[in-house]
Amino acid sequence: MNPQKNITKTPNYVGAVGFMRTDFLFPEFDVLVDNKGYDIIWERAIKCPCSKNTGTHLSTCKNCQGGGWVYINPLQIKAVAQSINKTTKFKEWSIEMLGTASFTVKSQYQLGFMDKITLINSISPFSEVRMVNRFQDRLIANLVYPPLLIVDIFKFDKPEEPLILLDENSYQIHGNFIEFAHNSVQPDDCIAVSYKHKVQYNILDLNHDVRNTIILDNQSRETDINLPISAIGRRRHNIPDTLNFVGDNIIDNSYKR
């Protein structure tokens, strides 16, 4: 057993009587978040144990969809959000430079690495190329975001032939997945999907992981409080995640305490 270490405390400085004191006005900040913040859904991220210490996550896992992260306990809160996209003026442009934002929430919410943020009232267009897979005698393709509206779906046939526009009655949306009629596509067909979705981010960095300060309460007593934590998020399509998963009926691991 390790011996208990004696910790020496420095004395409090008491020679500043009469000096002005500046405290953080956290109630006013909470009002700012409530009045000016976005309505978001915050989902906590936990690492999926499907890797079994091998470092490789199962592509068939219905908990993490092969991405290694499970999102649980969705909670609707407010957040001040600001885009901080890297400037592309006079520089080589790429899609990876897009979709970075900062989020600040009330101090009671502890955002963590890879947590998922969904902006409830923000809609964005997106286009991606996917492969059609056979799953339990069904033809499906999984998308990065749950579509709100499919704009169009094109199927590749031959390099010398035009793309084939699929009829909107030949597919249905199920969460992140599109299920196709058997006469419209075949397994391993390559399709381009354009759709609209709610904007989603993953938290990749915390500017101030720990932020505390001491304020005077309404009885002039010093009280230690947590300050709001600012986090940096990246749009989910720029983060390797669920692209190789084949299946549906994703398991919800959320719980209530």
Image: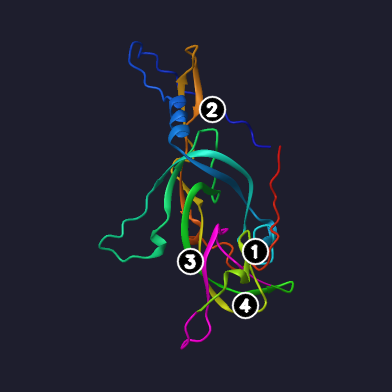
Sequence-wise first label, 2 or 3: 2
Mark 1 lies on residue? 57
Residue at image x 53%, y 42%? 111
Q: Residue at x 66, y 56 (%)?
A: 48
Magenta stretch: give its range: 139-163
Q: Which residue is mark 3?
A: 127
Mark 1 touching mark 3, by CB under 8 A? no
Residue 7's label in the rendered image is 2
Q: Position of residue 256 (x, y in %)?
A: 71, 39
Quadrant of image for the N terminus = top right
Q: Residues within 10 Å of mark 1 (few under 14, many from 20)?
A: some
| In the foreground, 223 or 218 | 218
Amino acid under disc 4: Ser
Q: Quadrant of residue 245?
A: bottom right
**Could you tell me if the residues under marks 2 and 1 are in contact, i.e. CB atoms within 8 Å?**
no
Residue at the image position 40 percent from the left and 64 percent from the top: 95
Q: Position of residue 93 (x, y in %)?
A: 33, 65
What amino acid does circle 3 point to?
Ser
Q: CA distance from mark 2 to mark 4?
A: 72 Å
Q: Earlier in the sequence, mark 4 or mark 1?
A: 1
Q: Is residue 120 magenta?
A: no
Q: Tell which circle, 3 or 4, labels the residue nearer the N-terminal end.
A: 3
